[in-house]
Image (cartoon, grey):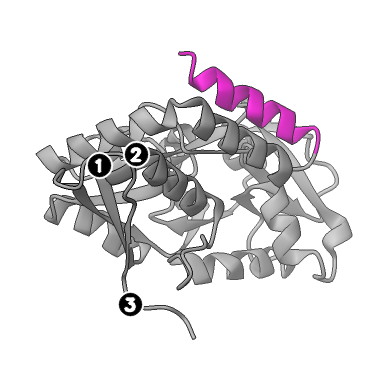
Amino acid sequence: MKLYATILLLCIYSVPVNSEPLHVKIMTDFIPQADGSPENEATEFVLAAAIELGNKISLQFVPGSQLQDWKQLSQLPDVCLLNKLKTPEREASAIFTRYPLMAFPENKLIVFNKPTLPNSISLTDAVNYYDLTIGVTSRRSYSAKIDDFIKRHEEHFFKVDGAANAIQLGYMLFENKIDAIFEYKSMFIHRYQRAHGIDKIRYLTIEPSEPAAFGYIACSPSPQGKQAIALFEHALQTEKIKTLISTRLMELFPAPDNTLIVDAFNAAYKN
């Protein structure tokens, strides 16, 4: 049975018991299980960060949705979101950690049965020269450059709402109802590996290419949010947490993407 109750995780270690922890609500689709085990990598990493911080922070995981999460962030003073891309629009209404919690391979422009398209393509050529209609999920951030391009060329994009409908975009691609979608290659293969026609799928590099995309912790623009960000940044900079994340990223993605992603992740901590 899916766990809808909130889970309160209090990590008490060497800090004196009279030290009041900072209480933070984590809005997420991935609630830890009853035994405290995480449901995805971002949750695993933030739980490890909380343990590293000891009694300085307590996390309350609350089931949410993409739209509801960002509303709660602006309405409540003690909310944080995990694994969020930074964009100018989001940074205007939230406080982000300086250092990433997660890293991903770059989005590919995924097409079906289009053998004449080049292996690398700019978004301008995709919509203006090749006249592609691209399926996207509303309120999902793909990257700052892709999000900005979508806003300026909305007539070339077919939009659906919600994560559940995002899966349907892939099937629409196989049915030639749309020409392309944005997605991570490994995620697309995982979702549609048994789909008829998978051998006719191509993964085009979007120019200019980027080695990786990063997911950050975003918190309410409030005194509590600032405190939470400061604590998370302290934990993320420890060798224990950095090693945990980089090791897991190397396991999570196939070669050669994993090496590029880990190198980009490590470089982000040096800048």
Given contact means CB atoms under 8 Å apart, are the residues at marks 2 and 3 in contact?
no
- Find disc 3 in the rendering and name its residue: 5
Q: Residue at x 43, y 50 (%)?
A: 47
Q: Position of residue 127 (x, y in %)?
A: 58, 42
Q: Residue at x 75, y 57 (%)?
A: 189
Residue kind at label 1, given as amino acid type:
Lys
- Find disc 2 in the rendering and name its residue: 53
Q: Position of residue 60 (x, y in %)?
A: 29, 60
Q: What's the magenta bit mostly, secondary-structure-wise? A: helix
Residue kind at label 3, given as amino acid type:
Ala
Q: Can you say which quadrant of the picture contains the C terminus?
A: top left
Q: Which residues are magenta?
A: 255-271
Q: Could you tell me which secondary element the residue under label 1 belongs to?
A: helix
- Answer whether residue 264 is visible to the viewer in this image: yes
Q: Position of residue 38 (x, y in %)?
A: 51, 60
- Find disc 1 in the rendering and name its residue: 56
Residue kind at label 2, given as amino acid type:
Leu
